[in-house]
Amino acid sequence: MNLTLIGAGNLGRALTRGLLASGALPPSAITATDRMPQAREAFLALNPALNWAETIPAALASADLAIWAVKPQQIGEALPEGATAPSGAVFISVCAGVTLARLEALAGAERKLIRAMPNTPALVGEGVTALAGNAACTAADLEAAARIFSAVGKVVRVKESEMDAVTALSGSGPAFFYFIIDELAAAARRHGLESEEALAMAAQTARGAARMILETGLPPRELMAQVTSKGGTTEAGLAVLDTPAARDLLEQTIAAAARRARELAAG
C-alpha cells in the first residue's frame, strides 16, 4: 500500500513516525508534499528513504491512500489537484468542519472519500481518530484507513452525523482536560502542596485514571466507588463535584463545541 500525505506538518510527520516505528509501512511506501519549503527537510529527516514530491499530482501518481492534511480553507483549492490520482485511490480529509458532501463536490461522488477527525494527542501516539466514509467507500477502504491512524492511537468508526459530537468530545476534549488538570494542580498548591511537581502529579493522576477505565473495562462510577470510603476524603470532594450544577457545566461545554462544529460545517 502506498500512502501520500498532502501536507507534511505536525500530523503528517506524527503519522509517518508511528507508521515507521510500528513497521506498518516501509519508508519507500510513503510520499509527501507541502507548499511550505521547510517542510521537506523536516519530513525527510525522519528517514532518508521517504519520498518527496514537489506537486500534488506528482505525489498522488501511485497513491492507494491520500491524507489531505491541509487547512480547511485550503481544501477547495487543493483537492481538485487530485483529479489525476488513480481512480481507486482513497482520499482522507482531516479538515475540521469539511463535510463529505463538500468533499464530493470538489472531488466527485465517485471518489472514495473518508472524513477523519484525529486529535492533538496523536502527536505523542495517544490520539483518537474518528472515521466516516462516503457511499463509494468499502469496508476494506475504511479498514485500510484505520490501520494508518492506529499508528498514532485509537480509531473508531462513526456515522458522519456524529462528527459534530466527535469534534466536541475528542477534537476539543484535550483542551478541556488540560484546563481541569491545570486547575486541580493550582488548587492543590493553594491548599499546601509546595512541590514543583504539582502539575505533573495532576497529569499523571489523570493518565492513571484514564488507563484504569480503558484497561479494566469498568464503568467510571464503579471505579469512583472503589476510591470512595464512607466519611473519607474522596467522599467529601465528590460531594462538591458530583452535583447537577457540575454536570450541567460539562453538558454546556460539549454543547457549545458541538454547536460551533455545526456552524463551521454549514459555512
Image: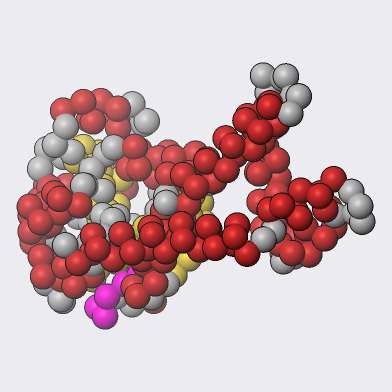
Image quadrant in which you'd find residue 54: top left
Residue drawn 21% across the image and 47% down it: 70
Residue drawn 39% across the image and 72% down it: 162
Image coordinates for residue 35, horizontal then vertical, percent: 14, 36
Image quadrant in which you'd find residue 97: bottom left
Is 234 inside the magenta-drawn segment? no
Is 132 inside the magenta-drawn segment? yes
Image coordinates for residue 200, horizontal then vertical, percent: 65, 29
- Tell me where the magenta segment starts and ends, as one range: 130-136
Depicted 208 relative to depicted 241: above or below: above
Residue drawn 16% across the image and 28% down it: 37
Image coordinates for residue 21, horizontal then vertical, percent: 49, 40
The residue lying toward the viewer, choosing from 51 and 36, is 36
37 vs 95, left or right, is left
The residue lying toward the viewer, choosing from 16 and 131, is 131
Which residue ends up furthest to the bottom in the rendered image?
135
Which residue ends up furthest to the right in the rendered image?
230
263 vs 156, left or right, is left
Quarter of the picture containing the N terminus is bottom left
